[in-house]
Amino acid sequence: MAFDGTDRDWCPALPAQMADGFRLRVAQFGDGYAQRTLDGINFQRRRWQLRFEMKTDDVIADMLAYLEAQRGNSFSYYDPSSGKYYQVNCDEWTVDWLRAKFAASGNRTELRGTLSAEFVQAFGVTA
């Protein structure tokens, strides 16, 4: 599996936060004057704060194994809000665990997890 939109279990919960901005070089002069210029050819970078909520322990284990296997390298992410694919990096993540009762499973208590991660748009050569 991957975060490429092919598996429903691997889609983030909505609303998902996306931040967009420019990388700038700013030279500050006297009297409040500043000269601003875009920094590099990939000056616009997107970041997504994502939550994959209430996933089974098997799905969370698969997600963790995938992120760990990337070892900081970029991977493909499908952004459901824009319908576009991006190359992203994910360097850190957290998992919150919860025991919950589900009527659909005969009132059994199941372990569910929420994985939170920041995906940052990647540029350049990827391994």
Image (cartoon, grey):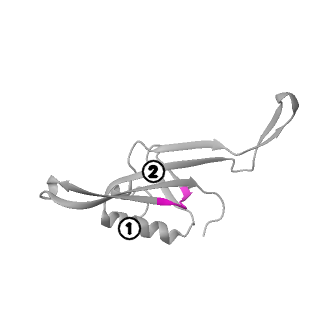
| Mark 2: few/some/many CA within 10 Å (<14, 14-19, 20+) | many
Residue bearing mark 2: 50
Residue type for callout 1: Asp
* The quarter of the displayed image where residue 16 is located: top left
Q: Is residue 1 left or right of residue 25?
A: left
Whole-number angstrom distance, CA of label 1 to CA of label 2: 17 Å
Q: Residue at x 83, y 30 (%)?
A: 33
Q: Is residue 79 left or right of residue 73?
A: left
Q: Residue at x 62, y 48 (%)?
A: 45
Where's residue 18, x and y in %? 51, 44
Q: Residue at x 48, y 59 (%)?
A: 93
Q: The N terminus appears in which quarter of the rendering?
A: bottom left
At mark 2, the secondary structure is strand
Q: Is residue 90 magenta?
A: yes
Residue bearing mark 1: 62
Q: Does residue 50 lie above or below 2 as drawn? A: above
For the record, the magenta segment spans 87-93
Where's residue 99, x and y in %? 26, 58
- Of mark 1 and mark 2, the one earlier in the sequence is 2
Where's residue 109, x and y in %? 19, 60
Of 29 and 81, nearer the camera is 29
At mark 1, the secondary structure is helix
Q: Is residue 33 magenta?
A: no
Q: Residue at x 45, y 50 (%)?
A: 50
Q: Is residue 1 visible?
A: no
Where's residue 105, x and y in %? 15, 58
Residue type for callout 2: Leu
